[in-house]
Amino acid sequence: MGKDKDNKLDAESLTSCEATCQMIKKARKDGVILDADRAAEMRPCPIGADSACCKHCFMGPCRLNPRDPYSKAGVCGATIDTIMARNFARMVATGSAAHNDHGMSILELFKGIIDGKITDYKISDTAKLEVVAKSIGIETEGRSIKEIGTDLYKELDKTYTQVEGEMPFVKRAPADTLEDWRKAGIVPRGAMREVMELLTRTHIGCDQHYENITRQSSRTALADGWGGSMVATELSDIMFGTPSPLLADVNMGVLKEDQVNVIVHGHEPNLFESMLAAVNDPFFINAAKEKGAKGINLVGMCCSGAEMMSRHGVPHAGNFGSTEAVIVTGAVDAMVVDIQCIKQGLVEVAKCYDTHMVTTNPRCMIEGATHIEFDEEEPRACTDEILFKAISRFSTRKMPVEIPKITNPGIHGFSHEYIEYVLGGTFRGSYYTLNDNIINGRIRGVAGVVGCTNPRVKQDHVHIELVKELIKNDVLVLQTGCSQIALAKAGFLVPEAAHFAGPGLSEVCEAVGIPPVLGLGSCVDNSRILIAASAMVKAGGLGTRIADLPVAGAAPEWMSEKAIAIGQYFVASGVYTVFGVGFPIVKDTKFHDLLYDGLEKQGFGKWGTASDPHEIAQLMIAHIDKKRKELGIDKARDRVLVDMSDRRELSA
Ligand code: SF4
Ligand code: MSK
């Protein structure tokens, strides 16, 4: 990696995103420090990076030697396996809690609408309301929306509060997968109970068997994927509309110099939905015009941005790695945030560029930011106050504006319902065609590539190179979150990207008219991938459990505890899941063997780690091929590929 004249890493080596690169250079010129430069200054602690330390009690903190992990134990006698399993468990607990807390807020909002207490939102997708209710055994025939909705609320409330029994949405898993969970004793009861129990087990002197701790980690992670995240996705669709493909622009070029620019960044769609209503209110459009603006430009970032783009085509300015950099444009009149993945550093950067930095959720206040609390019963009080501030900042803009002139159009909004429609057809109404193309070998398998960006690696680079390699090898890629935005910026969410795919996948994409990379939305929308995988099993021909499918997952630039919870729910559901950047674990330990091999032997998925995108791709493809072989469909693929290349030669 090269250095610039101030001995800092070249901006080009920090990001593949041209717009972010331009803003890193500008920030350095302006004397403003961004996350990428803070990361270069902050060397990770090598013992913590390997998860070989513990600070769970004050007899410690205890540090073990990752190079000789069994040479000593903590003061209490805790071994390296106990310490790593407990650290891992706490990450799963936090990640699962975050998604479940989000899901619980969405459920409360749903209840408020059904009860008639909240009137600013409505039930938008009544057909989906019925489908979801039926999927968990609620009678819908001849009943009103209020009756069905009330029962659905009561049933889904168990996702969080139930202390005994099985969480409602686990019924949607393939029967054999559910049976595997039952045998292992990891069917989640209620998320509050699972998170509480997992944290209890990690207390000094409690659970000190790495396998037993990890069993509860799986249970708590499943309470995320098949619990809080799935509730959030399904109810958000019911309230705000189920996405179907639409064209939307991504990248910093979506900001407009002559308009009032408002960015919403975070994870809960309700704030964003209300902001969308507010910016379309003629009162505010006129108020902006009176101050010399051509209008109000609402833009998203990170996951709520991905959700709003999927549902309404709201433009998206960039992923986690660009949230500070976008403020450097000087064009952001208000940066409005709710919860999760909000860097505290935003406040300092916003101060430097005279941008209003506004927090809105009582769970997420930031010192130095303006807090304007959002209340679903009176949402416009918050959004309108923010808009007055943003308009007034526009009219008194002091900072020079420099907006990178880059926008990348792409197709977003592939809900699992739409995938079923486009790859199954209305006639069959299942994943039959997808399965058929996997069985005949045109599609080698399916990969979920998801998750964050991390300033420890070149932004977007690993995502892009990994996905390129996968589609080249006929692997259909499903995406969510910041990874989806990385590929959108690289121009891969368009049908024309089928040219970069292998012959089999490109043939299917061209026939159906879809890109080889399908964007499913935000990080809670990873639950759409679970439902898609279950639908593949149910469509037949590819085994009887998710673990049988030729599928794999990756979070190549992960950084958050939520990512670890997501990884563990995919693994516990039966998916081989590879993380890039690194992983907090010491090799040649029993805990490492369990995560990277033992769980698969027990019938689940397993973890993998590699930092090079091509190596990640090879690991995933090798797993997909292994599953094809186990299913006895490996020969079909050889035949199809010979046919295709023959055909290409003939037409050349
Ligand atoms: Fe050390 Fe044990 Fe306390 Fe952890 S719980 S800090 S290993 S004494
Ligand atoms: S926002 S969790 S950086 S995907 Fe969901 Fe992006 Fe990862 Fe946050």
Image (cartoon, grey):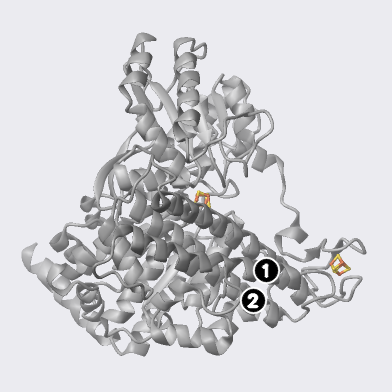
Please name whichever residue, 177 or 329, is drawn nearer the observer in this view of the structure: 177
The kind of secondary structure element at disc 1 is helix
Q: Is residue 425 left or right of residue 19?
A: left
Q: Mark 1 = which residue?
A: 89
Residue 16 appears in the picture as rendered:
no
Please name whichever residue, 161 or 97, is drawn nearer the observer in this view of the structure: 161
Question: Residue 119 placed where, x, y %?
Answer: 39, 41
Figure quadrant of residue 89: bottom right
Residue 209 appears in the picture as rendered:
yes
Q: Mark 2 = which residue?
A: 216
Q: Amino acid at mark 1?
A: Ala
At a point 20% along the width and 61% down the height, the residue shown is 509
Question: Residue 594 placed where, x, y %?
Answer: 63, 81
Q: Amino acid at mark 2?
A: Gln
Figure quadrant of residue 60: bottom right
Image quarter where the C terminus lies is bottom left
Characterize the local packing of mark 2: few (<14), some (14-19) or many (20 or more) Cα atoms within 10 angstroms. Answer: many
At a point 29% along the width and 85% down the height, the residue shown is 634
Q: Is residue 271 above or below residue 182?
A: above
At a point 54% along the width and 22% down the height, the residue shown is 355
